[in-house]
Image (cartoon, coloured by chain):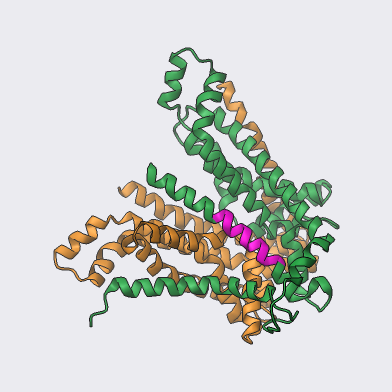
Amino acid sequence: MRLDAKTLLRVYTFTVLALVYAPIAALAVQSFSESPLIGVWEGFTLKWYSMIPGDERALRALYNSLSVAALSALSSIVIALLALAGYRRVRRVTLVDLAVYPPLILPDIVEAVALLMFLVYLGFPLGFYSVLVGHTAFNVAYAYIILAPALRGGTKLEEAARTLGASPLQVFIRVTLPLAAPGLISAFTLTFLLSFTDFIKTLFTTGPGFETLPLMIWNRARRPGLGEYSSYSYLAALSTLLVASSISIAAVYTLYALRRGARS
Amino acid sequence: MNPSRLLAAPLILYLIVFFYAPLLYIALVGASIEGFPRSYIEAVSRPEFHVFYIKGAAAATIATLMAIILSVPVAFYAAYYARRIERALIVVAMVSTFWVDVLLRALSLKLLFQAIGVSPGFWPMVVGLAYEVLPIVFIASYLGASQAPRELIDAARTLGAGPLQAFARVALPISAPWIAAGAAASFVYSFADYAVPSLLGGTTGFTVGNLIYTLILEGDRWGVGSAVAVMLTLVSAAGAALLFGRLYRIEVGR
């Protein structure tokens, strides 16, 4: 029998996918285990999940993460939209275009160290606002890059609207924004997730008492114990919920992006 | 100047205050806290730091190679062989983990390792880094593989090339620059990472990220920490130049 390339590659592909999801599957299995110890299965339970609503530290961290992510996503989109509105008709590469790339490329630990030291130098208090300001610094760059294709260069539709008597503001609200809507959805999803899952920049720029979910999980994972909220199985339950929600948002978004890509 | 350009002012000001000024600050002032150019000299010449550079570079290189070996065949399968739904499924499954918190991915791997009796150290950390960068390398390879039109490969096959030959002489050269770009991004990411080493590295797994963390947040050596961060910026700028130079050449070559 001749083994063809397609079958081989297919087997390889699904092996890789199995490897990629094995740790996540292990996490999920652990979260349903009666035993608090890693790799020990003493029967199925939902008790770890039922503990989550009583974990005030986790709920506060969730609230912190959600508020930073929402505010950072919204403000970065507004800032990026303003900048793009100013350069609507410019097609050549501008200084603004060049200025947004370095934040995308630089390792976040460098950004984080630099921002921490600069904020301390300025006397800026470390906590909610310093974390928000730090997340928005990379998010404005991402928002700009995602929104630029839809907003750059006056489209024919806009010119038609103007010829038909629409004012610039009307054109922007009735033509430009609807055209940019898919870009806005992408920009919000991505900037929100980037902030929600950020670890390194938050680790460096946070102050005493302000903890996001990634920081809380890291703090507990570094010193796990048998205590109620610091056992591995409880951490696994918390993490499984977070992983499941990130993956579903990402899957819906990727499918949406693939479909849009297929249409254009 | 066109007054509407002023609308870009908030963006520019924001980036200056919270991105460019901090960088300039650590390069000029931060690294001089302990005397200029003493911090830079210490950052370069101190033997204890070399362990971080060498191990970090080795870990980043191996992790990048592992990610290439794992993701390139998958990218080619998805781009050339898979039908629509299967392709969407593979791409979604490979890309989705990118949006899971790096920390959660590292934590899940740590749990799996402990369950099977592997304790933290250099190699578990390398596997963890490969796991983190896999989606990056996959996206780059998939975009690269999609650049080589199916017809071109069919033409090679019609002209007598075997499947392997068609792959090696047509598909691979077209997508190579993209894979290289993905590899550069993956190297810079793993070299600077802190999340994976902190959970999977144990006492023998180090990257430059660990060094910076230790100097800044634990050791109170802000001068030397800044110097190391500035040098890391230069390394990643070189990586980025390679990345964009390649992609630029692809665009221009067309």
Q: Label the magenta part by its dominant secondary structure.
A: helix
Q: Residue furthest bottom?
A: B117
Return the x and y of residue A159 as percentages of the image width and height: 43, 20
Note the chain letter of the green one: A
Return the x and y of residue A189 as percentages of the image width and height: 59, 47
Q: Is residue B127 left or right of residue A157?
A: right
As for residue A240 lying within the magenta part, the answer is yes
* Residue A98 visible here: no
Say above or below: A1 vs B218. Answer: below
Say above or below: A93 vs A50. Answer: above
Q: Residue furthest left?
A: B159
**Which colour represents chain B?**
orange
As for residue A25 lying within the magenta part, the answer is no
Q: Is residue B175 left or right of residue B71?
A: left
Q: Which residues are magenta?
A: A238-250
Return the x and y of residue A166 as percentages of the image width and height: 50, 15
The structure residue drawn at horizontal position 50% and vertical position 35%, both measured from the top left corner, is A94
Return the x and y of residue B213 as percentages of the image width and height: 72, 66
